[in-house]
Image: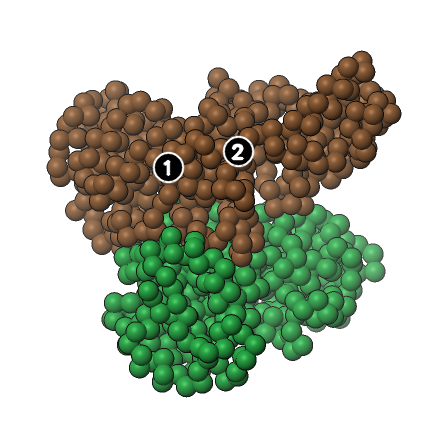
Chain colours: A green, B brown
Amino acid sequence: MKNIAILGFGVVGQGVAELLTKNAAEVKRLVGDDLYIKYILDLRDFPESPFADRVVHDYAVIAKDTAVDAVIEVMGGSHPAFEFTMQALAAGKHVITSNKQVVAEYGAEMLAEAKKNGVCYHFEASVGGGIPVLMPIIEILRHNKVREVRGILNGTTNYILTKMFTFGDSFEASLADAQEKGYAERNPDADILGVDACRKIAILGALVSGASIDPDRIHTEGITAIRAQDVAVANKNHMAIKLLGRALCEEDGKVMLMVAPFLIDADAPLGGVHGVYNAVEVIADPVDNVMFYGRGAGAGPTASAVVGDLCRCFTEGTHTAPIRFEKEPERLSDFARFTAQHYIATDAAIEAVQAAFGSVTVLSEGEELAVLTDPINEADFEACAQKLIASGAKVLSHLRKLS
Amino acid sequence: MKNIAILGFGVVGQGVAELLTKNAAEVKRLVGDDLYIKYILDLRDFPESPFADRVVHDYAVIAKDTAVDAVIEVMGGSHPAFEFTMQALAAGKHVITSNKQVVAEYGAEMLAEAKKNGVCYHFEASVGGGIPVLMPIIEILRHNKVREVRGILNGTTNYILTKMFTFGDSFEASLADAQEKGYAERNPDADILGVDACRKIAILGALVSGASIDPDRIHTEGITAIRAQDVAVANKNHMAIKLLGRALCEEDGKVMLMVAPFLIDADAPLGGVHGVYNAVEVIADPVDNVMFYGRGAGAGPTASAVVGDLCRCFTEGTHTAPIRFEKEPERLSDFARFTAQHYIATDAAIEAVQAAFGSVTVLSEGEELAVLTDPINEADFEACAQKLIASGAKVLSHLRKLS
């Protein structure tokens, strides 16, 4: 029998406990042993829960119990999740997490500590919820030359954008609807400002490039500035708008990281990912492009990824492909060099836009003019936009296009 | 250094050799050792190839060389691929294959032989080309209760269907176009009659149910009977037609297997998979639905999957989740019990159709009548169709709908 401790008995923790109970036969067949939830750490008590007798309030009980084989950290936040994880790893316990914040910030330290102690630190559930994506990247695709990994990494914002596209609603109305349905939190900032997606792209970027970059340094835009007018222009031109995390591996070994809304051709693989679904696309040689799609959140899908990792601790153990995931801040590429076609909506006449940007493609005319520029980098875009503004015009909206 | 032998130097074999050369640094970082192609088995010589000096014509040379660590079988066909594989496994060599035919027919025997000898038998490339799908199912999703695995498993037929939907072309014209572009072979039967997809669903079905079923016993329909008129009706009703392999795990432990074209809502995940792309969708508790998407064929993608498996032989080795994959013919469910909505196009009047099928949904009227029945099983459908035919009407086309 293997003994498990769960840190945090919220939605995900309860999902894990339920899965280990309901699918106990499947888990046993896989692992060849019973998994027993010995402890649940939470500040609260759960008198109604079938696990009421396992609840403890002091982490020291778990840390010092040598019979605990694996710790499932589903507390969220960086502290004390980081300290608890380091203690568990140092004590020779496997650790599995769904906590993207702590992985994005301290993944390098925790992976090194796991390696030092000959145990596993797995975090499949931290990106894409139930979708198996990190492990396929690590184990099956890493001999490829990865050019880019990009994805729709946040279900809340994708739900809001889908709502705007389907019904022509405003961002505010769509956010209110998402909150009503429980897809967005009362304080939705971490989702709508791109913070959540930023942590996830930091993790994906580290896995494909080897360089773990502080999320605070990643260029991050949310979806709050997207207007119903932009959605209408996109729809008319058979495009979607998706909040993407992107990690581009450059020739010189640097990695370009960002989170921002992008215009996408509606027929592109990521263009067809709707509602609360997430998807991660890997572009690499020679596999070309592969995409992983599924539910990016929720108790069941997230618990599936956590328990998948847990089982792997007891089957593969540390017999896995080596992960390069190290703090190498100098490898972050300068966002000013990022090149794309830019979309702007403006009150200017086409002549003024051309005077500022050179040749452009008109997407829509009427009350506003909406155009796509030729591919230019961020620094040049900024200079051109300033020129347009200096001519007396307003930039009403700005997006980039995924090429 | 690890020594590799490649059996068969066709498109995939050459792709593997090229990948091991081009991405040697990535592979070495992953495996911690150089991989050296010591032998290439082929009937032909390749005097222009950089590997000309490795070509041998006699398998015995490879089989008896104890320095060969892994054999890559990319010959195709069941014989002598099966015998060569069994010899290599018995001699303690890992075997990796892209050969769906031999896996579908002899997977159980080869996996048992590998286990007996403490080596790996991996076959990621046999389904979905470069898409990592088998390994995620085996390693990350197997603690789920799988309800179904289904997919677009053949790029040639998907290209033909996409062409029919995009341009309204006939099946014959679309096949000719696919042949011209090199997506279909001169003798396209294995693709268009569903044989290739059948082998792949046999493999997927075995992985999720544990029961390996002889492909010959799986209900298999191709796409040759799909008419431009059916495509027009589907398009008008915002549906696609896709050739699907489906494996449904039933409550009683049986598995329902089939290959057939299905009507699908255009917005469903599989409905948006176009051209030569493949996709596999897994529906399971509690992960819900996840989908894997990418290039299902071609030298580069297939070589990626082969080399991914090869690397795993030297990293994880046999420290993997146990695979249940055994010949259990009694677990195949009776196709007559399979229940779905049926689409028919007919020259009958609606009254005659209702007299035969009861209530139906009209999809299109005019020269022909196209309807969807309520969900009924295959046996009942057959009886109703005979009743319609007995009334003097013709069934011009028949498809099922994915619910």
Q: What secondary structure is found at the residue carrying circle 2?
A: loop
* Residue A312 visible in rendering: no
Q: In this image, B327 relative to A119: left or right?
A: right
Kindly identify which residue carries mark 2: B333
Vertical order, B91 against A200 (above or below): above
Q: In this image, A327 relative to A175: left or right?
A: left
- Marking on residue B326: 1
Closer to the chain start, of discs 2 and 1, is: 1
Residue A389 lies, in percent from the top left, at 70, 70
Q: In this image, A238 relative to B56: left or right?
A: right
Residue beneath the point at 80% across and 31% down? B358
Q: Quadrant of residue B251?
A: top right
* Residue B102 visible in rendering: yes
Chain at numbered mark 2: B
Chain at numbered mark 1: B
The crowd level at tag 1 (other Cα within 10 Å; few <14, some 14-19, many 20+) is some
Give amino acid for label 2: Ser
Q: What secondary structure is found at the residue carrying circle 1?
A: strand
